[in-house]
Amino acid sequence: MTLGDSAATGLRLEQTGDGGHNNSSSIFPTAAPFARAPGRRVRSRLCNLLATTLSADVLHYELIVVGAGAAGLIAAARAAELGKRTLLLEKNRKPGVKILISGGTRCNLTHDCDARGIVAAFGSAGPFLNSALARLGPRDVVELFHAEGVPTYVEAGTGKVFPLSDRALDVANALVRRLRRSGAELALGEPVTRIERIEGEERARFRVTTPLRSLTAAKLLVAVGGKSYAGCGTTGDGYRWLAELGHTIRPPRPALVPLTSDAAWVRELSGIAIPDMVLRVAPSDPARPVKRVRGLPPGVLIERRGAVLFTHTGLSGPTPLDVSREVTKAGDPRDVVLLADFFPDVPAEKLAEQLREAAERDGKKFVVGLVPDVLPRRLVEALFVQAEVPIDRRAAEFGKAERARVVEALKRGRIPVSGSRGFDKAEVTAGGVALDEVDSRTMESKLVPGLYLAGEILDLDGFIGGYNFQAAFSTGLLAAESL
Ligand SMILES: Cc1cc2nc3c(=O)[nH]c(=O)nc-3n(C[C@H](O)[C@H](O)[C@H](O)COP(=O)(O)OP(=O)(O)OC[C@H]3O[C@@H](n4cnc5c(N)ncnc54)[C@H](O)[C@@H]3O)c2cc1C
């Protein structure tokens, strides 16, 4: 029967209603046909469902997966391939909505590196991913998509892996195709509203409620993502369920998000793009003790090198997005400061020397003209103003103290930040289910037997570059194989 027809994926899902594991004499009632046939109204689906559920007390599955995103799609397919009677519930009327909009609709599905590179992109939480990456590393993800007829390429200079077609749609379709073959059932447009634990029941440990019906499952995988880009269906539903089941939820906060600044001089630079610079986040009070981060100078919370874009609200582009997790972590964003190094390959002393020599060579020049012209003039002028050096000062009058202030602005320029653009503009959610409550070798909850977690619902957030999809695929697959 036709299970689904997604306008977004362009795929028609053809599946048997029993997921290939059922027959009429089974103790489990047959699952209802879910997805929309073209032109049919949701109301008729509802009638079908009611008719089916009325004929049985409750539908039972060996596994219910909640959320048909990157983690849920791969997990449901794999579990069904391994013989589990699996139902995948998705609130949207299309599967993989976030995949479709990802990477500017190109979907950066992983990164061209080894497992260690992926681990490093998740900061101190990274080692949690070791087992999942041992099972499905970045090269395995590439192979997986190649096997589904989606060749990929590595973007020069960034290491990002994209489908050769540059179409996120192909990535989503590949996952849906595999799901279809696996025999898992997919229920679209059916949000889970409640999850309960059934005490003392081995066969049916969980009750899952949707507006259409009540279901039971021996095992449950929650893969509902975080709470950013809520329009994609990710409204943070999982946090409440999991807190009710006893899990600690580390406060969700926006990550990979543009930063805002109240400073007029920053906003006035809107439109300027710097292709290569370093941003560091540090406590605004240098006396505040911070835990030393391996590989970073003392007092620095995070450091990234790459492109920065000044916008009418603050800073965007990959580098501000990558460091944003430390800004949103601060209770008050003013507790941290953004330090900009516009000449990452030139030590401060050398830059000071270059400025002195340039001033000596041409004393009549305006001081702003002494700065190597790789930086836009508008930015250089703003930095001189911040350094309290008049931009119409002649090079011959450029004193040592002023030079030192300019070097400070160019190498450790303080860019005031007032916060972030919030969950609406955050590509991922930092925070989530505490990792020490989840067995990283299986993705099973340490508190609730039979409960599994995968993807962004976990307290994991990686840099831009395909790392977040990689984590979702790896944790989803590991969970499915550990059930
Ligand atoms: C604009 C944008 C661009 C991005 N680009 C990239 C990129 O190029 N590369 C990369 O690695 N990462 C990217 N990301 C991040 C990446 O999309 C996520 O990290 C990844 O999708 C997480 O996968 P997931 O399966 O955990 O959750 P999701 O993909 O978010 O899927 C969760 C699913 O659960 C469903 N759901 C939620 N609540 C319920 C409920 N109550 N009942 C039923 N279903 C529910 C949601 O509708 C959703 O479909 C991007 C994110 C955004 C917002």
Image: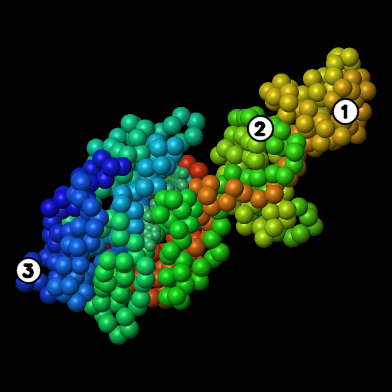
Amino acid at the residue labelled 3: Ser
**Marks 2 & 3, CB-CB < 8 Å contact:** no
Q: Amino acid at mark 1?
A: Pro
Q: Residue at x 56, y 47 (%)?
A: 257
Q: Position of residue 217 (x, y in %)?
A: 26, 72
SS for dot 1: loop
User: Relative to 32, does residue 271 appear above or below in the rendering?
Assistant: above
Q: Which residue is mark 3?
A: 24
Q: Which residue is label 1 attached to?
A: 390
The kind of residue on which mark 2 rests is Ser
Residues 208 and 327: in front is 208
Seen in the picture, residue 404 relative to 19 is either above or below; the reply is: above
* Image quadrant in which the C terminus is located: bottom left
Residue drawn at point x = 46 percent, y = 61 percent: 236
For mark 2, what is the residue?
270
**Horizontal side, residue 201 vs residue 344: left or right:** left
Q: Quadrant of residue 28?
A: bottom left
Mark 2 or 3 closer to N-term?
3
Question: Between marks 1 and 2, how big is the CA–CA gap?
Answer: 22 Å
Q: Is residue 207 above or below residue 86?
A: below
Query: Earlier along the polypeptide chain: callout 3 or callout 1?
Result: 3
